[in-house]
Amino acid sequence: MNKFALIVLAILSLNSCTNEITAPSKNSCYIVYDAGSSGTRLYIYEQSGAGLLSHEGPKVSALADPIRHIHGKSLRDLNAITNEVASTLDLIKVDGPLEEGKPKWSGFDWSKQCEAQSVKVFATAGMRIAEQISPTDSHTLWQTLTTKIAAKVGPKVSVEAKTLSGFEEGLFAWLSVKDQYPTGHYGIVEMGGASSQITFPCPHCSPENDAVKTVTVNGKPIQIYSYSYLGLGQNEAPRSLPIPFVDPVPKNCAYGAGANNPDWTIASCADQIPITAEGSKTDIKAPYHYSKAGTKGTTNALPATQKNIPNWLLMGAFNYAKETDIDDFCVNKHDGYYNADIACFRPIYLEKYLKILDIQANQSSKVDVSWTQGAAICEVENCLANITTPPVCRWMKSGCLAH
């Protein structure tokens, strides 16, 4: 080999080494779908240093709708809805359409701007109800969706699609705010459309309680109590609780119930909402759960150590409730709430629910964070690695649905 060839080879080798050294590495990112009862929203969490940057994407149809035959959907729409959910991975790559002069979401091309580690499609209470109604159709939905998501992200990215247990949903909501409360001395109450979750650290709880698990947080084991009441979400409660219905809530809880009734009081509505079992102040109903004997409809009392939690964070529907709601929608007929049928019921129900939990206003505050952030944190920290027995699927007679 002549000297010129040697020089060229040396330069090429040097450039190759330089490129290897200076080429910027991409951040890892974790793709999480919140498949809730009102719709399915895409979130991408990009790891930046010790934190996570959130990229919120489009919201599309609820996965459970074609199984539950609600919101005008049927099994004929299953293919279209799974296509819609998978397509959000393309939609988020560019800015969303304008709404009031601003894009609905900011574009983030995950395929170029980060290194995707996983996709988690996690469904919550709406899908628990769907799996109750038809496990076979639900299984088909999960298989169909997993195939379509995998085709979008490629074989190197792991894909998991399933319905979360109530324990996991509550835990993820609790983890989503742990950076704001590093001591960990807080509990969360999350109110969704179809269920409500209550989660808090419970070091003195009996591990025999199947709502108690030891998880890993910041590299340390911590015992967590997390329970979800399926059927007690703000939209589902009028259907699930045995209350005297008057299309679709009790007359004293109807929209504008007090507008022309000088005798109307908040109590006249609240007294007709039986959140606890008859004769009990602590046994909260879980209308859609199965007992170990296989009967539908159970109750659950929170452990006494709940009273030791100094700070409670209220999530989900609590964030949208206003102090004026009872006046606006019960005493009057103020226009402005998307579902007039439960516009009066909702604020009274939320207020009564917190009262039963014995959570005072001076020890609670609202926080607007998605539980999907907690799901990403859990994956990064492998928070469930040391759980010896998996969380239970209380909504199924025969255990969790195989995916």
Image (cartoon, helix red, strand yellow):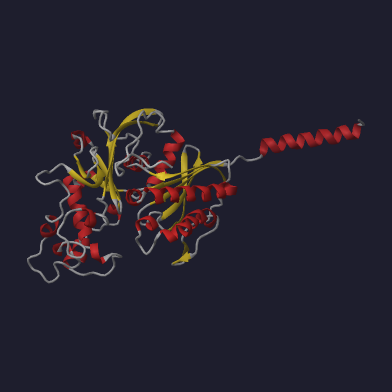
Farthest residue toward the right?
2
User: 33 or 76, which is in the foreground?
Assistant: 76
Farthest residue toward the left?
263
- Look at 25% across and 58% down and name the residue there: 322
Residue 362 occupies which quadrant of the picture? Answer: top left
Please state if 76 lies on the left or on the right of 253 as rendered.
Answer: right
The N terminus appears in which quarter of the rendering?
A: top right
Residue 334 in the image, given as x and y percentages of width and height: 23, 69
Residue 291 occupies which quadrant of the picture? Answer: top left
Residue 70 in the image, given as x and y percentages of width and height: 34, 60
- Look at 55% across and 42% down and name the residue there: 157
Residue 306 in the image, given as x and y percentages of width and height: 21, 36
- Look at 20% across and 38% down and name the residue there: 302
- Look at 24% across and 50% down and name the residue there: 232
Please indicate, yes or no, whether residue 324 appears anywhere in the rendered image: no
Farthest residue toward the bottom?
260
- Vertical placement of residue 320 versus 154, above or below: below
- Vertical placement of residue 213 versus 132, above or below: above
Residue 245 in the image, given as x and y percentages of width and height: 17, 61
Please indicate, yes or no, whether residue 32 appears anywhere in the rendered image: yes
Please state if 236 lies on the left or on the right of 13 as rendered.
Answer: left
The C terminus appears in which quarter of the rendering?
A: top left
